[in-house]
Image (cartoon, rainbow, N blue to C red):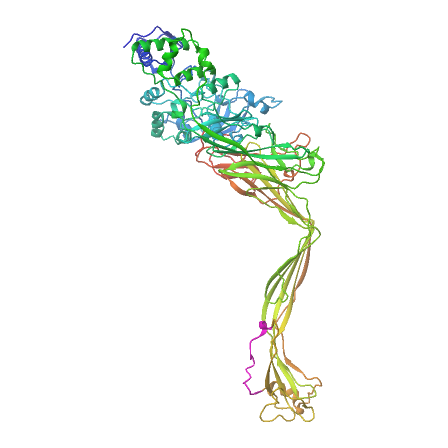
Amino acid sequence: MLAPRPYGRFAEQAELSPEDSAAVEQLARAVTNFKQLSALDSLKRVAELPSGRQAVAIDMGGVFRVLVLERHENPQHELTGQAETNLPMLFSGVITRAQVLEGEGVGIKLTEQTRRRLIGYRDEPLPPKDVALQRFRIEYPDRFSYFRPEYSGIYTFTQFTKLRPTWFSGAMAEVMQVAGGYGRQAMADLPEDDIERARMRVPERYMREIRRQVAGVRLPGYTGFPDREGQFQCGYLHSKGNAVSFDTDGSPWLLQLNARGVFAMPLPLVPATTTAAFREYIEEVGDAELLKLLDRFGGMPTGETFPEEEKDFEAWRRAGVFIKVCDCADFYDHQAFYAASGWSLNSRGTEGFNTCWDHDGSGLLRAHAYKLKLRLGAVADGGRLKATWQFEDPADAARAHAYLDRVFQTLRDGTHRSRAIAYKIRRQSAAQILARAAVTNGPDTDHWDALELDAIASHQGSVSRVGTGPLYWPGKNPTSMGRLKFPELRGLGCESFVMVSEDYAGPAVRCDTIVFGCYVDDELQVVKYFYDERKFQESEQSTFEKYMIVGQWEKTVTTGLSGLMGYFYTSAFDDRQEAPPVTTTTHITGTDMGYGQPAFATPPILYCVGSLSRARYYMHRTKVKSTSGFGIDVAACVPVFERDCILYPYTDSTSGRAESEKTEQFAMADPTSYQLWCYDNLFHWMGQTDNHNKGDPPSKDGVPVYIDTLVYSPTEVSDYADSGNWYNLPPGGFLDVTAICGPYTSRSSGTQHAGGVVIGGEAPGFEPFSSEKLYPAEQSGRLSVSMKTAGSVVAHREVPHSWYFGFSPVEDTYFYRDAVHNAIGDAGYASIYEQDQNGFRRRWGHTALADNMSAHHFIGVINE
């Protein structure tokens, strides 16, 4: 083993014991030996000392030093660009108090898995379920300063008050929910408390392997640490936002979308959590929350993002780490519908959608819809690089090592430029390093800084316009149309999009235009604005027939001009309909009542011939409904806190309504009837039947009375009453009906009637009915929602709040609606700012952490 290079040793507390000193010396020798044999540009090693303290050996930029840290403290990590062994503690749960008084900690209700994680998965008493931690007393970052209240009084409004992960879309919301679970990382600034200063501790048998796997690894564009102050780093605004996409191998990339284009970099992860050893440990302890992250992202996301400064961004672009996927300048040439409208992406980040607007040459508002398509190529190990240089000649190794020491002496400041240069150098071959060492004796950093390398991966993508349409609204009053609402930037509520085209003076324009879109469970849902002022005389709609006996028929008659109503509709909900000023609907139900009694008609005075007939009866129930002043109204609202959510309120109303109902009985004659006859030389002697008055014995003095003739007289509708020879008259024969008719035809009866009499013929029993009701103005409605976990469902069937359809704000007061969901974890949960009958929020799914009373801010992974 080689003798160690001289090094500086720094201990936080007292001098080292002989045992610790020996261990430090052994660590220094091991680092020197490994670094020189491998020709590494820099190296860092961590070792546990016999006393339990921790030694961190750092050989970088020509300076070699060893830091000795006390037990339970985090190493003083430097931003070297190399992978470290840091393992931040992830808190999962729900924020219960984000607005705190002086000295108060932020309230959190922890998951059971987090409570186990905090005690290292040991069989010990669990920490409290409900905690208040200074670790999460984190104010809004400057990039989110618009959330800071103008007057905070005695309270501190932490970033958890309004900065929800659900402002982001797709997997980016998952990353932000996880990033919110780290809290502040400056442990020395926190109270001396095991929970406040908690960090993950992994058994040494796993840590040895983790150190080996991350040793000397260079990171692509990120540090591998959560933000020191625990602040959210990524953005969701229209002007510049972040998203996550997965490449062809399933590895995650962080996206930045702005007017410059769509750029991708490997998603920043905690390096130690990407190792096989870490996963083996997490599987051993059964931490399902962390396993969810390892399965989804391959490690624990840090929450880091692209640097703000142009020079820093360019340094990594030249290193081939920040990769331009495609242009999107055409989209950003237009205006945002609302400031927080970053791109919506599906769960894999392969598709995205957004909308914008401008004015055409005539001053008319126009909306545009754009589709983002991405296919990201893979890169080995997420772009993390190990040193692969091998120098067969010791002299070459010495020259390379001397050259690299000169270069890295100038790269000790931890800036993006220095780290990008170091990453570029790591991408070079041993031959390229030696070639460069042969031409210069200086630090050579300007050369490496200016060098542009090919991208570390091959990406493809496009941003294409997929729809354009007008947004016409009659009139010039901005508040006359307030039905389209988006979140106000400060989260104060929802503000109406002004639909008025002040400079447009042309005719009315028909509209059927996309104004918003988002992915709900990987299905694109869009909102369309609809306008068509054309009116028409609606034709009568009827199933009435010429002859209506038994069955059902309906007729709708409109009075006045009709038109299509409903200004908005979505992919899932469409209530547009034709609405006339007055509608009258008549519904008739015909019911069979059967045959009435046979009717025997005796011959009148002087005549011989009478008749036998019957009829079949039916009833009509007629219902008439008349509606006047019918109207509907629909709106579209994107709530506060949610990028991928659509609230769709609907209401209908009438200015008056009338209903009437009546029943009527009708009859149809049987087409089969009969002739009957009798003879009396005084009263019945004129005429004869078609069969010439058959009967035996012959009729005399008005008796017997005979039926001898069947008469069949069908019509085009008589089939309903036709049942053939219903009185069973024998063919060519006769029937004696004296018992029925004789009492009225016999001379001896003394009941002669000049016109004859009718015996029988009664109809089936029937009780007529008639009613009429008048109703005053009526209103009904419902609220539907499209969002993750809920899908596209009706939230309630009550009349939505009238402000959904009015303009917001009014005198600086905003119409307020919000929505949230659990972004990552097995517990599907979503809720909106609408109360059920018990006063709780309307919600879908379940998590034991939710009280269903507020728009919860979840942190970490929620599985319960």
Residue 547 in percent (x, y) is at: 63, 67
Residue closer to the observer: 445 or 702: 445
Report how many numbered discs are placed on residues in the image.
0
Residue 794 vs 762, above or below: the answer is: above
Asked if the magenta segment contains residue 719, the reply would be: yes
Residue 558 vs 51, above or below: the answer is: below
Left or right: 39 in relation to 194: left
Residue 396 vs 323, above or below: the answer is: above
Picture quarter with the N terminus: top left
Range covered by the magenta-colored residues: 718-735
Residue closer to the observer: 563 or 669: 563
Picture quarter with the C terminus: top left
Evaluate whether residue 57 shows in this view: no
Residue 678 occupies quadrant = bottom right
Residue 402 vs 159, above or below: the answer is: above
Q: Main secondary structure of the magenta part?
A: loop
Left or right: 790 in relation to 112: right
Left or right: 766 in relation to 460: right
Residue 483 in percent (x, y) is at: 64, 38
Residue 711 in percent (x, y) is at: 60, 81
Asked if the magenta segment contains residue 666, the reply would be: no
Left or right: 203 in relation to 544: left
Residue closer to the observer: 88 or 562: 562
Residue 444 occupies quadrant = top left
Residue 425 occupies quadrant = top left
Residue 692 in percent (x, y) is at: 62, 89
Residue closer to the observer: 849 or 425: 425
Evaluate whether residue 258 shows in this view: yes
